[in-house]
Amino acid sequence: MKSHSRRFSAFVVAAVAGLPCALTIAGDPTSPNTTSQNSGRNREYSFAEREFASADKLRGSKVENAANDNIGTIDELIIDRGSGAVAYVVLDAGGFLGIGSKSVVVPFSSFGWDPEDRRLTLSTTADQVKAWPEYNKDNWRGTDSSLSSKLSRDYYRSPSGYYPANVPQESSRIKGKVTKIDRRSIPGSSGEEMVVTVQTDDNRTEQVVIGPTWYLSGSDVAIYRDAPIELSVGRVQREGRDVLLARSVSVNSRDIPMYDKSGAPGWGNYDSNNTTNNDRRLTQTSGHPFMFSKDLDGKKVEARGERCGKIDDLLVECRSGRVAFLSIDPDQNVLGIADAKRLIPWDVAMLVTNESVMLDASKAMIVSSPQTPSDLRTIPTGDAYRNVYQGFGISEPYYYNRNNDSGTRRNPDMNNNNNNNNNNNNNNNNNNNRNNEPRRSPTPNQNPEPAPK
């Protein structure tokens, strides 16, 4: 077997690490803000280069190293609820080089991908396996000291004051309709945030930063295009520019809890100045940052509140380490189409809760979406799959291309006037280039470092 090993040149080695975009630390193993010399951050992936794999088939698959040693079996994929990034893999490593029965949590960025045998590979040693944190479902989450909380704190760390408790400039109110939704990476973090464009009732256009996508995705209230929205906003400085930051959000007259009475964000700021309170808030949110891929199996899917099917599978793009598509089994009685699986971009999944997945999509978009192919290798070469994002009124996700929409995901309005939408978004590109930092891209890795216990 020809082994193809890679690594995201960055990789956090302390209380967490590991999204495909995490950072390598040479000096301080706890800092998420130090990059390696070979970051590979300008790497771009054309559609033809992408490699897709079924989450159902990845689970239960064996993992080997370059010497063809059987390291273990993949038990689960741990996914960022907001971005769809595969953060970690639960690996059953029992029996590898004399190791007893043990399941460990391994950063996805440590794995390679073998396109010939279509499986994940891992160059590691027994000592490294022993150093990875042990997975135990009984203490995975639920307390500040649980493994999921420890991993989340470093994974979602944002710059100090990025979501300030007190907005220095006066607040104002914005009322109107959502016309566009962007997702942007958070500097120094593996997370991303949501930014909405609002057409106000007095015919102005305002762009507002809402908050982390994982937090909003776990809410009971969905933000979607064409939705009536009312926000209280404050003006803050980011990288020398004024930015409108939401302090309260109401969609369809339903409030999304954002900041507590002290002004602290409900998701925690994850900076070094307020660790204890941030830990507490992290475990009390309605949707935890991480979820297992199995949690999505069979989950019902709603198109703006109306049921349209259930999830059949997740399709992972193995170079970027992201869930690129949901494969849904449509409800024939509702949609009027045969029982053929359909591809839905993860980027239109606005709510991912314990009960359902809510899409920012219409029935017409789902009906016209391409069928999930039996051979995933055909996705990069099929025109229908190349245009799947356009069919949902969005562009390719920001992490594929450094220059694609300035590192954001584009959501044109719902009139499907693609020519006008493209022109408008092209005009916005130059304005947003400084603010949207793309994720790091993978570079070869032969000696992955362990995540912390």
Image (cartoon, rainbow, N blue to C red):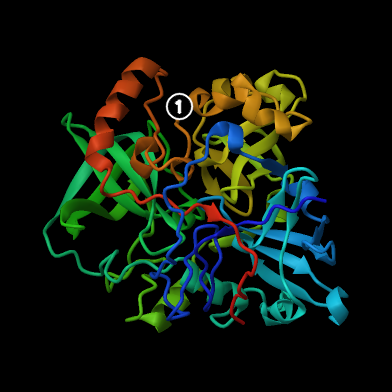
Q: Amino acid at mark 1?
A: Gly
Quarter holding the C terminus? bottom right
The number of numbered badges drawn on the structure is: 1
Give residue 339's position: percent from left, percent from top: 77, 25
User: Residue 273: image x %, image y %?
Assistant: 32, 81
Residue bearing mark 1: 393
Q: Is residue 164 visible?
A: yes
User: What residue sits 40% from the left and 49% below the top?
Assistant: 438
Q: Quadrant of residue 418?
A: top left
Q: Where is residue 328, by image quadrant?
A: top right
Q: Which residue: 63% across, 54% down?
A: 354
x 82%, y 63%: residue: 73
Q: Quick one: 355 or 183, which is closer to the camera?
A: 183
> Residue 353, percent across and down?
58, 52
449 shown above or below 231:
below
Quadrant position of residue 59:
bottom right
In the image, taking residue 262 as reference, residue 81 lies left or right, namely right
Q: Residue at x 27, y 46 (%)?
A: 208
Q: Is residue 372 visible?
A: no
Q: Left or right: 320 with respect to 277?
A: right
Assess disc 1: are there few (<14), some (14-19) or many (≥20) residues with their C-alpha within 10 Å of its C-alpha. many
Local secondary structure at mark 1:
loop
Foreground of the two, 389 or 17 = 17
| Residue 453 sits above or below residue 5 on the image | below
Above-or-below relation of 182 to 377: below
Residue 199 against residue 335 in the figure, above or below: below
- The percent coordinates of residue 200 (x first, y second) are 22, 34
